[in-house]
Image (cartoon, rainbow, N blue to C red):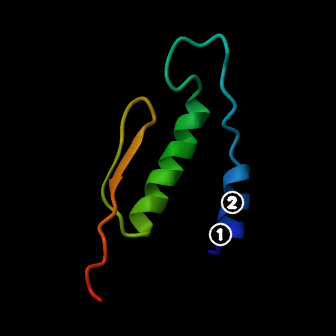
Amino acid sequence: MDITERFINYTKFDTQSAEDSDCVPSTKKQLVFAEYLKKELEREGLDDVELDEKGYIYATLKANTKG
């Protein structure tokens, strides 16, 4: 998938926040998008991909040392 297709795919997710919410993320649909991003990072080969309960995603990108 090229960068344009990837961006268009991201825009299909409804990630609007809820102003009256007191939690993070403010809507469950934001976590749906975060789950999608997590899976995408795993498919791209990043290591240690984690998604926490607040929707933050952590991953390790290792440098290619072959030159």
- Residue appearing at x 43%, y 68% in the figure: 43
Q: Is residue 17 above or below residue 55?
A: above
Q: Residue 56 location, x and y as percent?
A: 42, 38
Q: Is residue 4 above or below residue 12?
A: below
**Helix, strand or loop under label 2:** helix
- Residue appearing at x 51%, y 52% in the figure: 37
**Which of the labelled discs sits on residue 7, or is there none?**
2
Q: Amino acid at mark 2?
A: Phe
From the image, which quarter does the C terminus lie in? Answer: bottom left
Q: Amino acid at mark 1?
A: Ile
Contact between labelled residues 1 and 2, with CB atoms less than 8 Å apart: yes
- Residue appearing at x 68%, y 46% in the figure: 13
| Snapshot quadrant of residue 62 | bottom left
From the image, which quarter does the N terminus lie in? Answer: bottom right
- Residue appearing at x 55%, y 41% in the figure: 32
| Residue wearing tag 1 | 3
**Helix, strand or loop under label 1:** helix
Q: Is residue 27 above or below residue 44?
A: above
**Which residue is farthest bottom?**
67
Within 10 angstroms of label 2, few (less than 14), some, or many (20 or more) residues? few
Q: CA distance from mark 2 to mark 1?
A: 6 Å
